[in-house]
Image (cartoon, grey):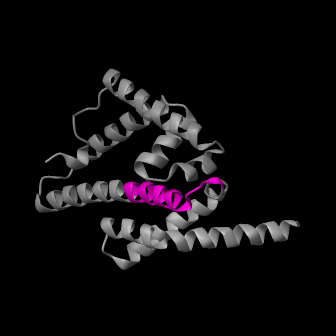
């Protein structure tokens, strides 16, 4: 069997598994959002992750379960990101409603200096992993590619980075309990 035949066989096997799981994945995604564009995006993400992990998919007795597991992970990440966005929107609305939200240039400079000082105490990989995961909400697979590591190593970098940040912040607390942009 040539590599072209193998690739064609993989594509046919993947297509078959995709068709078998389409209804289950669509139903799972529909529970998370009613917006059709968002549903299409989530289904595309599920399909991409299943394709990337097709070796596991092909080895599984029930490929639909693999697709549903990907859907669960994608929807969980999407929901968590949506919650963070809603908190940000809520804070933004509160800040827009008050006039006393500006800070001085000196306070902003002190806050930035403190942030840089705290983050500089992490290793480069931990700092990047925490930034990509917590601030930008990248999936672990993408962070692993960016840092040239595997998923498990990236998860350890994020976990250790957050643990170290908690310890560092206890030793070197910020100027106040809230960032300047949230003080009212």
**Which residue is the extreme one toward the bottom?**
36
Q: Is residue 184 left or right of residue 115?
A: left
Q: Name the residue nearer the viewer: 94 or 48.
A: 48
Relative height, residue 97 to residue 34 (above, below): above
Q: Residue at x 43, y 37 (%)?
A: 116
Q: Which residues are magenta?
A: 59-77
**Which residue is the extreme one toward the front?**
61
Q: Name the residue nearer the viewer: 117 or 161.
A: 161
**Which residue is the extreme one toward the top?**
171
Q: Residue at x 46, y 47 (%)?
A: 133
The image position of residue 179, as x and y in percent, is 26, 42
Figure quadrant of residue 37:
bottom left
Decide whether residue 123 is among the magenta residues: no
Q: Name the residue nearer the viewer: 28 or 170.
A: 28
Magenta span main SS: helix
Q: Name the residue nearer the viewer: 9 or 126.
A: 9
Q: Residue at x 69, y 71 (%)?
A: 11
Q: Residue at x 29, y 41 (%)?
A: 106
Q: Is residue 82 left or right of residue 46?
A: left
């Amino acid at each position: 069997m040539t590599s072209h035949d193998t690739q064609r066989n993989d594509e046919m096997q993947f297509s078959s598994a995709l068709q078998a799981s389409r209804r289950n994945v669509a139903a799972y995604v529909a529970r998370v959002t009613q917006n059709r564009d968002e549903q299409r995006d989530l289904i595309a993400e599920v399909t991409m992750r299943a394709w990337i992990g097709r070796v596991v998919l092909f080895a599984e007795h029930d490929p639909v379960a693999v697709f549903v597991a990907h859907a669960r992970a994608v929807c969980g990440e999407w929901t968590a990101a949506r919650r963070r966005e809603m908190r940000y929107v809520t804070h933004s609305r509160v800040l827009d409603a008050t006039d006393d939200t500006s800070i001085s240039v000196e306070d902003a400079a002190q806050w930035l200096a403190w942030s840089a000082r705290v983050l500089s105490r992490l290793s480069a990989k931990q700092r990047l992993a925490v930034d990509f995961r917590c601030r930008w909400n990248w999936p672990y697979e993408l962070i692993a590619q960016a840092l040239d590591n595997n998923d498990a190593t990236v998860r350890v970098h994020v976990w250790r980075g957050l643990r170290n940040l908690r310890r560092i912040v206890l030793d070197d607390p910020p100027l106040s309990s809230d960032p300047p942009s949230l003080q009212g």
